[in-house]
Image (spheres, grey):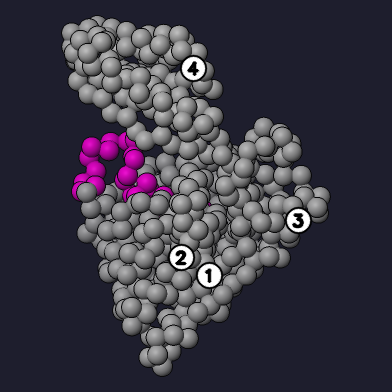
Amino acid sequence: MKKVRIGAAQGFYGDTLEPAVETAKRGEIQYLCFDCLAELTLAILAKDRTRDPDAGYTKDVPSAMRTLLPLAREKGFKILTNGGGINPLGAWREVIKVARELELEDLKVAVVTGDDILPRLAELRGKGVSLQDLETGRSFDSLKAPLMFANAYLGSWPIVEALRRGADVVITGRTTDTAQFLAPLIYEFDWGEEDWDRLAQGILMGHLMECSGQSTGGNFSGNWWEIDDLDRIGFPVAEVDSDGTFVLTKTEGTGGLVCVDTVKEQMLYEIHNPAAYVTPDVVVDFTTATLKDVGLNRVLVKGATGKPRPDALKAVMGYEDGYMGQVMIGYAWPDAMKKARAAERIIRNIMARRGWEYEEIHTSFVGYNSLHGSTVQGDEEELNEVYLRMAVRAKTKADAAKFRRLFPPLALNGPPGLGGLTGMETRQLVGMWSTLIPRELIENSVEIHVEVVGVDGTGAA
C-alpha cells in the first residue's frame, strides 16, 4: 500500500533548522514542509518592506535552502514553504539564486501568488465586498490609519497545481498553516475537492505538524521534566495512508517524545471549535478523531471527518497603530517591591505635571505579576528583586521615545538599590483587521510560475 512520508520543518519564522536537517538526512521523507507565518510575522515582514521594498519574505529562506537543497537532491524529497511572506516573488528569486550558486541541475522552483490583496482593495469594494472587521463589526470606512499589508489565506490547491507542474520547491505567501502539509497528500493520492473526510484527515495531520516540536515534546504541560534530549528534539514526521489515516512519529535517535498526550495538546492548540475547524479546503470535525499509542514515539491518528469548505476566504490586514515606548528598571532587596512601586509613582507624577497623555499606560512588576497580572496575591515583602516594567502607547514616535528619558534620573533621584535599567527601542505598533472575501474573487487572481534551474548545465532555464 502506498504511503507518503512528510517531515515538518520550522514552525515559525526564526525556529531552529537543526531538526529539519536531521529529518532531511535520516527521515526518509518525500516532502519537507515549513509553516513560517503568523499574523505577527506578517507585521514583522511589513516593517521590513517599509525599509526595503525588495524585502518582505523570511530572511532565513536563502540560508535554509543553501543547507537543504543539496540534501533534497541527494535524498529525493520536495520542499514546500510559505516563507515568501508578503513578497513570495522575492523569496522565489532568492531560492533560484541559491540553486544556481550550488550549480544544481534541473531543479524546478515554483511560486504561488495572489494572496496579496493590498493593491486590490478598491476593486474588491467596487464588487460589493464590505471588508467589515470580523472581530469588532467595524465598518472598513472607519479605518483611517494607513494599511501596511493585506493578505488572504490561500488553501492547498495552488500548491497542488505547482506539484502537478513538476515543482521540486514551492514558495508561497499567506497560505494557511496546514496548506503545505495537505497539498502533497492531495497530489500523491489524487484526492478530489469533495473528499471531505480524507481532506479532514490531511488538515488534522498538518495541524499536528505545523508547530514543529510542539507535538514531539516541546511546550508539553505533562511530565515535561521526564522528556529526554530537548536540546536535540526531533520534529514530527507523518506516515500517511491513502485514506488519510496516519502515524505521527519523529526521526529515530532524536530527542523529545511522541505520545497521545503530546499529540493531544497540539491537537487542541488554537482550536476555537473542535467540531468545526474552518480552513479554505474543508471544515474539519476533530471530535470524531481517535489517537492511539502504537509503539515507542508512534501515535496512530484516524477518524477526523469533514464538511464542505466555506464560500469565503479569511483575509488579514495590518494597519499603523501608533508606537510603543518601554523601559525596565530593577530594584534589589530589602523592600524591592516598595521601591519599584515608588518609582512608578514618580514617573506617573512627572508625566501628569508635564501634561503628557498617552493612549495606554501599562505597568507590571517582573518577578511578581508580569505573567499572571491582577490574579497574583502573593507576599510582596520578601522578594529578592523586582523589575518595574512600564510601557506606553503613543500616537507619534517622538512621544513614545521621550517616555524613556524619564527613567535615567531615577538612578540618583529615586529609591535606593537600583540594579539595572534597560530600554527597548521605540517600536511601531501594527493593528490587525480580519475580514471575509468571496473565494472566487481571490482564487481567480492566483498565479503559479515555475522556473527550471540548471537545464543542460547552463545555470538558467
In front: label 1 or label 2: 2
Residue 111 marker: 1
Give the alpha-carbon distance from disc 3 to disc 2, as whole Å. Answer: 27 Å
Under mark 1, the amino acid is Val
Q: What kind of residue is marked 2?
A: Ala
Residue at the disc numbered 3: 123
Element marked by disc 2: helix
Marks 1 & 3, CB-CB < 8 Å contact: no
Q: CA distance from mark 3 to mark 4?
A: 42 Å
Q: Amino acid at mark 4?
A: Trp
Marks 4, 2: nearer the viewer: 4
Foreground residue, 53 or 8?
A: 53
- Upstream in sequence: badge 1 or badge 3: 1
Front-lying residue, 44 or 305: 44
> Which residue is labeled 4 in the image?
356
> What whole-number distance in Å separates the C-alpha atoms at marks 4 and 2?
44 Å
Q: Is residue 303 found inside the magenta-colored segment of the image?
A: no
Badge nearest the viewer, 1 or 3: 3
Q: Earlier in the sequence, mark 4 or mark 2?
A: 2
**Mark 4 closeness class: few <14, some 14–19, many ≥20 residues within 10 Å:** few
Query: Quadrant location of residue 136?
Result: top right
- Asked whether residue 145 appears in the rendered view, the answer is yes
**Residue at the spot 28% in from the left edge and 7% down from the top edge:** 338
314 sits to left or right of 26: right
Q: Return the x and y of residue 138 as percentages of the image width and height.
A: 71, 34
Check disc 4 and report its element: helix, strand or loop: loop
Left or right: where does residue 225 sit relative to residue 94?
left
Q: Which residue appears at 39% of the width and 86% of the height?
A: 459
Residue type at numbered disc 3: Glu
Q: Is residue 78 visible?
A: no
For residue 91, the mark is 2
